[in-house]
Amino acid sequence: MSSGEPDGKKDRLEGRFFFSQPHQQVRIGLDPRLPDLVLPSVLEVPFARLAERGIVNYIFDVDNTLLPQFSQKVEDKVVKYLQKAQAEGWIRSACLLSNAMFGSERQLRMERIGKQLGIPDLFAADFWSRKPHPVGFYWALERMNCTPATTAIVGDQIYSDIVGGNRMGLYTILVSPPGPDHWSTGLVMRRLREWLLLRHYGISRPIWREAPEEE
C-alpha cells in the first residue's frame, strides 16, 4: 500500500506544508492554528517519509479520525495500515487521546477501540483537561517516553488537536472526518471556524478518501 505522500515531496516534509489535493502543496507562515500536513484521511499519513525525518511516535485522536463518530469498530483497512507502519518500524509507539469523560461509556468505547488497534495506552480527557489543554499531551509524551521533536498528532479538528499539538511543538497532521460530527461540534460552529481559517490561507480541505492509490 502506498504511504500516501505525493511524489517529489521526500525532502520537504519538515516544513509547514498543506496538502489540499494530490501533488499540490502551499507553504504558509507559522500560524499556530495551522497543521503541518492536511490529508484526506489517516490512510494517507506518510509514515515512512515522516520516519525518515525522525517522526516515529504518534498521538491519535479517535472520533472522526480513526473511525466515524459513534462507530464501535475500526475498519479493517485502517487497522492494517497502522499495523503495517508498526511492523515496518515507522511507528515505534502510539497512544489515543480523546475528549471523553473518565468513567463514561465513551472511555469504555475508547478501550475497545484501543484493543482493536493494539494500542493499550489511552487518555480520555475530562472537562478540565480537554484538548487543546496540554495535560493530555504531556501524559502522552511521558507514557511513550518520547520528545515533541519525534512525535506527531493526527486529528480532525483544528481547534483541539492541531492547536494543542502546535503548542507542544508536535508535528501536526489534520485529516478530514469520515463521518458526521457530534452535535456539540456544530453547536460551537467549530467546522465553520475551521473553514474560514483555511479559506483565509487559500487551503481547500480534501474530502475524506478511503485509501491511496496502489503504486
Image (cartoon, rainbow, N blue to C red):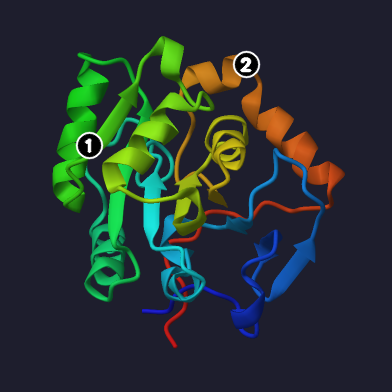
Q: Is residue 74 above or below residue 135?
A: below
Callout 1 crowding tier (Cα within 10 Å): few <14, some 14–19, many ≥20: few
Report which quarter residue 194 is drawn in: top right
Quadrant where the C terminus is found in the figure: bottom left
Question: What's the residue type where badge 2 is placed?
Answer: Val
Callout 2 crowding tier (Cα within 10 Å): few <14, some 14–19, many ≥20: few
SS of the residue under disc 2: loop
Quadrant where the N terminus is found in the figure: bottom left
Image spot of residue 160 (x, y percent) = 55, 30
Q: Is residue 149 left or right of residue 27?
A: left
Residue 173 in view? no
Q: Residue at x 73, y 71 (%)?
A: 24
Image spot of residue 59 (x, y percent) = 39, 46
SS of the residue under disc 1: loop
Q: Is residue 55 left or right of residue 106?
A: right
Q: Is residue 166 left or right of residue 46?
A: right
Could you tell me how far apart the alpha carbons at marks 1 and 2 are, in whole angstroms?
25 Å
Q: Give me the disc on residue 207.
A: none
Report which quarter residue 10 is drawn in: bottom right
Report which quarter residue 95 is drawn in: top left
Q: Is residue 190 left or right of residue 161?
A: right
Q: Give me the disc on residue 72.
A: 1
User: Which residue lies most toward the bottom here?
Assistant: 215
Question: What's the residue type where badge 1 is placed?
Answer: Gln
Image spot of residue 80 (x, y percent) = 24, 65
Image spot of residue 136 (x, y percent) = 40, 29
> What residue sits right under mark 2 in the picture?
188
Q: Is residue 42 above or below residue 51?
A: above
Q: Nearer the viewer, residue 24 or 58?
A: 58
